[in-house]
Amino acid sequence: MRPAFAADLPPLVAILRGLQPERAADVGRVLFDCGLRGVEVPLNRPGALPAIATLAAMAPADALVGAGTVLAEADVDAVAQAGGRLIVSPHFDPAIVARTIARGLIAAPGVFTASEAFAALRAGAHALKLFPAEGSSPAALRALATVLPEDTPLWPVGGLEPEHLAAWRAAGATGFGIGGALFKPAFDLDEIARRARAFVAAWHG
């Protein structure tokens, strides 16, 4: 069953891989000012937890901040300690989902097949990350959405550009994780803002 707060999940989640903690406040401010309300910092780069703490402290009340590439239960605890509320993994691990739920956080594990999707939902996942989206298609997502519980939050992630969003949404995507097309450590703030505005416009368009 769809969680009661699923309608409040952000439709666009910025994946800030490699975000330096000292830039977190400036990057976060740009993204929030552009209208984004979902932010995750993958844990497989240095400085992720301090960056999450900074973003969580400054985020608007309606924003959701958390971590990506969460691979262990201990990571869930560390993210919770930093103030993060969103736990995103590239895969489905029932132990990570259970720990996320136990901490009162939002679980968005990665899935690619119907078997993984149903297993993740049985474990209590709040949203499903379709990953890697490059290896799938809107047609595949449409078929998957047909058999999943109605209104299951589905977020394609991987290789997405603004012009891709319409086809995925028509197929049943309820949100997206946006990585390198939105943020890279080498991008300056103006470039990040330009890309963020393009994705927000594509979502609303």
Image (cartoon, rainbow, N blue to C red):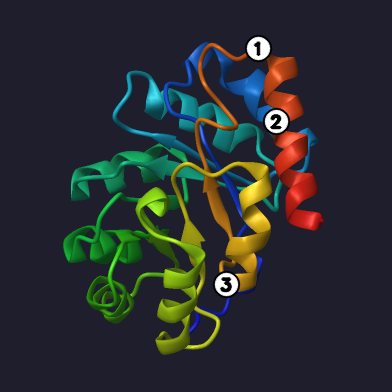
Reading the chain from its start, which is encountered first: label 3 or label 2?
A: 3
- Give how far across and how far down residue 66 sits, in percent: 46, 44
Residue placed at 43% from the left, 24% from the top? 50
The residue type indicated by label 3 comes to: Ala
The residue type indicated by label 1 comes to: Asp
What residue did someone put label 2 on? 195
What residue did someone put label 1 on? 188
For marks 3 and 2, give the one nearer the viewer. Answer: 3
Helix, strand or loop at mark 1: loop
What number is the disc on residue 171?
Answer: 3
Helix, strand or loop at mark 2: helix
Crowding at label 3, few (<14), some or many (≥20) Cα neighbours within 10 Å? some
The residue type indicated by label 2 comes to: Arg
- Give how far across and how far down residue 58 sits, in percent: 65, 33
How far apart in space, not on screen, are marks 2 and 1 (Cα)?
11 Å
Residue placed at 48% from the left, 71% from the top? 139
Quarter of the figure with the N terminus: bottom left
- Give how far across and how far down residue 47 sits, in percent: 38, 19
Crowding at label 1, few (<14), some or many (≥20) Cα neighbours within 10 Å? few
Helix, strand or loop at mark 3: helix
